[in-house]
Image (cartoon, grey):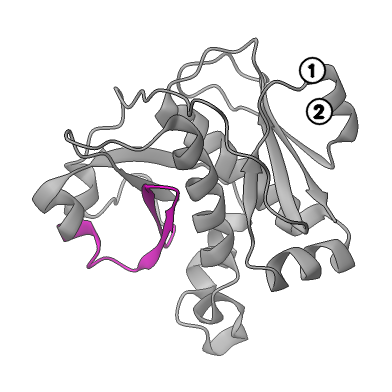
Amino acid sequence: MQLAVRAEKADPPSHDAVCEAAAAAVVRLLTDERVVGGDEGEWAAQVHRWESGRIRKVARRARGARWRAVLELPGVTVEHAGAQVRAFVPGPVDDVPAELAKLQVAGLDLPAADPPAPPPEPPYAALALNPDVAMSTGKAAAQSGHAAHLLLRRAPAPAVAAWLAAGARVHLVRGAPWRECARRATVAVRDAGFTEVPPGTMTAVAWTVS
């Protein structure tokens, strides 16, 4: 799955907002009627094929005309706290649409929000990134998407239903001890090691808050 992060030079979003928006965009695409509509869902076959294998995600940065161009591709855009992230219908890594292939993968590194935003009213999904692992904003956004994806599929059904009914809100937890976050977590992401971190690194965790 490709993700595009809008990062204009004049007014870039915060690292936190991008991670939260990326997680929400993944969830909203996976719960879109074009996916959950069974055999009649326009995107259902592509998503099923992707989830049956390795659920890799790649975050790219876009601005200006290139951002406008990717909005024409099938996907779901989330706008959140000044960030805009679009999740695209997944496909083969060797067959990325030209509009996306033009976008740079590396180099997206944005400042954290200062001060951190407070959590929303429950229910929401909490996610935490491993503070001992150095990741660019692009990498962190992809890991946030992974964590939300796993939470959607593996958390108890009542908790997921409540989370989705409330708008699939996501909150990036900052400042809490990593060990405590890992203890509370319902799911944990262990990276495949394609970029930035060694294979098997635990990069992110997530849990629902009700």
Residue closest to the far left: 65
Query: Residue 136's x, y, as percent?
Result: 43, 21
Magenta stretch containing residue 151, yes or no? no
Which residue is at a point 25% across and 63% down the rendered structure image?
A: 71
> For the residue carrying disc 2, how many other residues have a C-alpha within 10 Å: few (<14), some (14-19), or many (20+)?
many
Residue closest to the far bottom: 40
> Which disc, if any, is residue 10?
none
> Which disc, if any, is residue 181?
2
Element marked by disc 1: loop
Image quadrant occupied by the C terminus:
bottom right
Magenta stretch containing residue 79, yes or no? yes
Element marked by disc 2: helix
Which residue is at a point 77% across and 19% down the rendered structure image?
A: 178
Which residue is at a point 29% across and 51% down the rendered structure image?
A: 95
User: Disc 2 and disc 1: Cα gap in Å?
Assistant: 6 Å
> For the residue carrying disc 1, how many other residues have a C-alpha within 10 Å: few (<14), some (14-19), or many (20+)?
few
Which residue is at a point 63% across and 50% down the rendered structure image?
A: 170
Amino acid at the residue labelled 2: Cys
Residue 160 vertical position relative to residue 14 in the rendered view, above or below: below
Say whether residue 175 is left or right of residue 73. right
Query: Residue 112's x, y, as percent?
Result: 47, 25
Residue 55 vertical position relative to residue 12 in the rendered view, above or below: below
Residue 71 vertical position relative to residue 13 in the rendered view, above or below: below
Amino acid at the residue labelled 1: Pro
Query: Residue 147's x, y, as percent?
Result: 66, 42
Q: Report the span colored magenta.
A: 69-90
Is disc 2 in contact with disc 1, using a CB cutoff of under 8 Å? Answer: yes
- The residue labelled by disc 1 is 177
**Looking at the image, how many numbered discs can be counted on the residues?**
2
Observer-nearest of 65 and 196: 65
